[in-house]
Image (cartoon, grey):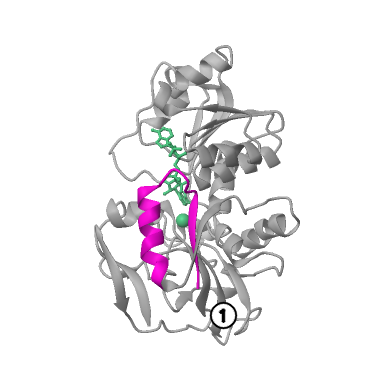
Amino acid sequence: MKGYAMLKIGESGWIEKERPKCGPMDAICKPLAIAICTSDVHTLWEGAIGERHNMILGHEGCAEIVEVGEMVKDFKPGDRVLVPAITPDWNSLEAQAGYSMHSGGMLAGWKFSNFKDGVFSEYFHVNDADGNLALLPDNINTVDACMLSDMVPTGFHGVELADVQFGDTVLVIGIGPVGLMSVAGANLRGAARIIAVGTRPVCVEAAKGYGATDFISYKNGPISEQVLAMTNGAGVDKIVIAGGSVKTFSEAVKCLKPGGKIGNVNYLGSGDVIDIPRVEWGVGMGHKQINGGLMPGGRLRMEKLGALVSSGKLDLSPLSTHVFEGWDHVEEALFLMRDKPADLIKPVVKI
Ligand code: NDP
Ligand code: ZN
């Protein structure tokens, strides 16, 4: 079979590989549509998770099942499915402890395009099919379905990590597709005011639609100063970080109220140390929580988030700004995600 792979850090291309084997609890799937993620960019061009040779890229897509193992109960060949980017081993101790995304070691629930071949391939392997796949609802198209692999569950996880409550003032730093879903999630959770940080006009427009009430640009000076100025010096209750760098945390701590919470889902591709400003962190006693996490995967989450889309409460159509048809366009879509033109939110390829 053919797959689009990371050949080594900084180099990618099509390769031939053997079709993966299906274990007793697994499924083999063929993509119906796939999407490119900023994480593919960090992995391939920044080498953020280290060197990988001939590893097929991609962890976002929806698919049709072509084969299932003999122990799989709820899925069969021909089923159309949502596929989460994170596919934990549900019988692991880490999953039993509540951290399925770290099943088998830190971040090891993230298997596609990290520990095994990803989904930019004619066929791909899904471990624990009953635990990880979900049927694709009839009224969700394959392009929107790709947004359920990672953008919705990750953006919403930022909101969960920040513990957004009714009436909160929430700062969302970064409004690419992940941050946009954090805006949507904060809005669904009842935030009163949502201040969004980002500049691409297409993202700003989409953020308005998802419930952002105020906008600032990180290019107009320190984020913290702008946020303090627009909140009369009070700062915000909660912060989701979905963009920026290791330096962004210091800005966040400076404009967070005591007792506030930060939820980071940004993938920090470079830098060794994260600064926490001593005084603004209450000289160690400010009750300003900093949480950072990989999104949870698995079937239940896919089914529940899929239900939000199916019911019409969450419209994913603004996210997919560039839709292509056919495998030939994978490279073009990947390079678009690297270059981030002004009109791009997310590129998707229908197969
Ligand atoms: P994008 O690059 O599309 O968006 C990044 C956003 O951050 C943009 O709004 C950008 O603004 C803004 N930004 C850039 N620089 C700064 C800065 N210095 N300060 C503040 N904001 C800044 O990324 P995605 O939405 O696709 O992904 C966001 C992050 O989430 C990525 O790092 C990605 O790898 C990660 N991720 C994490 C996952 C997880 O499970 N934890 C899963 C999937 C993705 P502008 O409008 O100017 O471009
Ligand atoms: Zn992704």
The foreground one among 17 and 36 is: 36
Can you say whether 106 is above or below 249 in the image? below
x, y percentage for residue 26? 52, 79
**Furthest residue to the top?**
232
Can residue 106 be seen? no
Is 298 placed above or below 337 here?
A: below
Q: Crowdedness of circle 1 by 10 Å Cα count: few (<14), some, many (20+)?
A: many
Q: Is residue 337 magenta?
A: yes
Left/right placement of residue 281 relative to residue 320 reads left
Magenta range is 328-351
Q: Is residue 104 visible?
A: yes
Rendering quadrant holding ligand 1: top left
Looking at the rendering, in which quadrant would you find the N terminus?
bottom left
Residue 50: x %, y % from top left: 27, 56
In front here: 172 or 2? 2
Residue at image point 55% right, 62% down: 146
Please tell me which residue is depicted at 64% across the width and 65% down the height of the picture: 141
Lateral position of residue 173 relative to residue 48, left or right: right
In the structure shown, which secondary structural element does the residue marked by tag 1 occupy? Answer: strand
Measured as percent of width and height from the top left, residue 61 is found at 52, 66
Q: Identify the residue under disc 1.
A: 65
Q: Residue 85 colored magenta? A: no
Residue drawn at x 55%, y 46% as measured from the top left? 155
At label 1, the amino acid type is Ile
Q: Is residue 110 left or right of residue 231?
A: left
